[in-house]
């Protein structure tokens, strides 16, 4: 079993209970996992609903994000076995059959996102290479192969290198987002403050819930995150995990909402609708609408960093869950399953990047309901089934997260049917 041969050569000291470099690196990795390509479309999706639904969703963003990820981390840490990953924990608490079904759903919720990011990263670099750098286009199979190989090489280089890579990417990403948000302030205009009808307001807010849920989700990295905290902090893993998740959620919400409001207050509703019609990211549309070289230059850089950082976080979750499934469904040991899993992920992501399919909307629709089930609903159901979690039964946050999960799933199913 993984980590079974690793020996812990440390003890928890008073200094380790305080915030340290380990906590910072993991906070950055979770931040980077959440801030993916979706943020470039988030102002459009939220802004079209009007100012008041946007304000309500902004107020709910922090509790939705923090409480849901805290619940999933608590679920992973509730295992009686210290080396358990997500697939082990669901089998332990829900039985072999249900556990494996949930584990497969968890993997299938992350896997399409990796394919999307493989396509998106290739397109972003190709566009920059041709349009900004004014160079001849590289063969798509070569460009995508180099990019995917480079990203997977970072993942295989070890936890320290991976966390440092997140730090290198996330700091400039956060700085650029803040700079763009502040740069747009002189262009702000007063939004329409007309109150919509109660029915229209509820309908708009309801359909906006999935947008918030998935734009701020870093669920793919939670299993690995919780496992590492248990190995590092032992008995204090839950307390430290909650501390890291809380700070990560605060920083994430602050940066992203500043960016969203700045973009929405800069563009009119008609311009937001035009951006959606053209299927452009908010930065691409701003660059065209303002004819601003500053935005045009930073746009591709933001897209590259955001997709790369989020790819690494989702690859972490996909590899861990696939390895767990392979070892349980075959005679492979962990080392063999790890090699096979990495090979499978590399080939499928590379092929998708070469083929460049138009499957973004479909994959988000398929992954969306499953992520809501895994992140919001399943951990709250576990509160009533798992002895280690029964102390959270009467907490308001348990009911809040479950209600948000049901709203997200129902809204996604409604959109699929309509």
Image: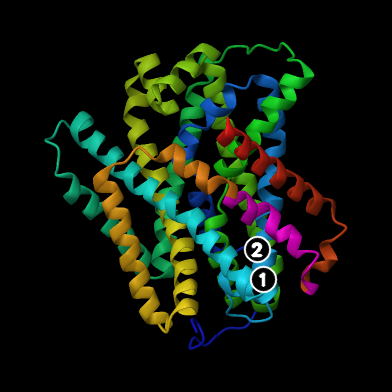
Quarter occupied by residue 9: bottom right
* Mark 2 and mark 1: Cα distance apart in space: 6 Å
Q: Residue at x 70, y 60 (%)?
A: 379
Whether residue 385 appears in magenta in the rendering, the answer is yes
Q: Residue furthest right?
A: 394
Q: Nearer the viewer, residue 343 or 171?
A: 343
Q: Residue at x 54, y 59 (%)?
A: 105
- State whether residue 36 appears in this view: no
- The local crowd at label 1, few if under 14, some if 14 to 19, many if 20 or more residues have their Cα within 10 Å, is many
Is residue 74 shown left or right of residue 40? right
Magenta part of the chain:
370-387
Q: Nearer the viewer, residue 183 or 104?
A: 104
Is residue 75 shown left or right of residue 36? right
Residue 283's place in the image compared with 7, above or below, is above
Whether residue 214 appears in magenta in the rendering, the answer is no
Q: Residue furthest front?
A: 417
- The local crowd at label 2, few if under 14, some if 14 to 19, many if 20 or more residues have their Cα within 10 Å, is many
Mark 1 — residue? 77
Q: Position of residue 35 (x, y in %)?
A: 49, 44
Marks 2 and 1 close (CB-CB < 8 Å)? yes
Residue 320's place in the image compared with 367, above or below, is below
Quarter occupied by residue 124: top left
Is residue 153 shown left or right of residue 35? left
Q: Nearer the viewer, residue 296 or 123?
A: 123
Residue 266's place in the image compared with 31, above or below, is above
- State whether residue 210 appears in this view: yes
- SS at circle 2: helix
Q: Residue at x 55, y 14 (%)?
A: 269
Q: Position of residue 199 (x, y in %)?
A: 76, 21
Q: Position of residue 163 (x, y in %)?
A: 45, 62
Mark 2 — residue? 73
């Amino acid at each position: 079993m993984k980590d079974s041969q690793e020996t812990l050569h440390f003890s928890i000291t008073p200094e380790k209970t305080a915030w340290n470099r380990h906590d910072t690196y993991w906070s950055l990795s979770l931040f980077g996992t959440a801030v993916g390509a979706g943020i470039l479309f988030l102002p459009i999706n939220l802004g079209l609903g009007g100012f008041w639904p946007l304000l309500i969703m902004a107020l709910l963003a922090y509790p939705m994000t923090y409480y849901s990820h805290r619940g999933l981390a608590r679920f992973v840490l509730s295992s009686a076995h210290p080396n358990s990953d997500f697939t082990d924990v669901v089998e332990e608490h829900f039985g072999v059959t249900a556990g494996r079904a949930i584990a497969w759903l968890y993997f299938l919720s992350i896997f399409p996102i990796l394919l999307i990011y493989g396509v998106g990263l290739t397109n972003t670099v190709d566009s920059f290479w041709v349009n900004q750098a004014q160079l001849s286009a590289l063969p798509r199979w070569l460009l995508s192969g180099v990019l995917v190989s480079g990203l997977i090489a970072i993942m295989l280089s070890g936890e320290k290198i991976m966390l440092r890579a997140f730090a290198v990417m996330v700091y400039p990403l956060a700085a650029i987002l803040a700079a763009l948000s502040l740069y747009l302030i002189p262009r702000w205009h007063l939004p329409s403050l007309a109150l919509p009808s109660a029915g229209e307001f509820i309908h708009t807010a309801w359909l906006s819930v999935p947008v918030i849920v998935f734009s701020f989700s870093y669920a793919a990295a939670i299993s690995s995150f919780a496992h590492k905290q248990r190995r590092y902090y032992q008995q204090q893993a839950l307390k430290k995990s909650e501390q890291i998740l809380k700070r990560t959620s605060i920083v994430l919400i602050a940066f992203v909402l500043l960016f969203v409001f700045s973009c929405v207050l800069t563009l009119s509703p008609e311009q937001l609708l035009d951006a959606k019609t053209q299927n452009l990211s908010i930065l691409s549309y701003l660059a065209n609408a303002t004819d601003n070289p500053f935005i045009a230059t930073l746009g591709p850089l933001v897209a590259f960093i955001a997709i790369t950082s989020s790819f690494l976080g989702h690859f972490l979750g996909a590899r861990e869950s696939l390895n767990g499934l392979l070892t349980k469904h075959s005679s492979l040991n962990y080392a063999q399953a790890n090699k096979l899993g990495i090979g499978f992920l590399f080939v499928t992501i590379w092929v998708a990047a070469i083929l460049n399919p138009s499957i973004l909307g479909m994959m988000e629709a398929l992954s969306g309901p499953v992520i809501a089930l895994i992140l919001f609903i399943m951990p709250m159901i576990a509160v009533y089934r798992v002895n280690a979690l029964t102390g959270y039964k009467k907490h308001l946050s348990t009911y809040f997260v479950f209600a948000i999960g049901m709203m997200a799933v129902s809204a996604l199913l409604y959109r699929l049917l309509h």
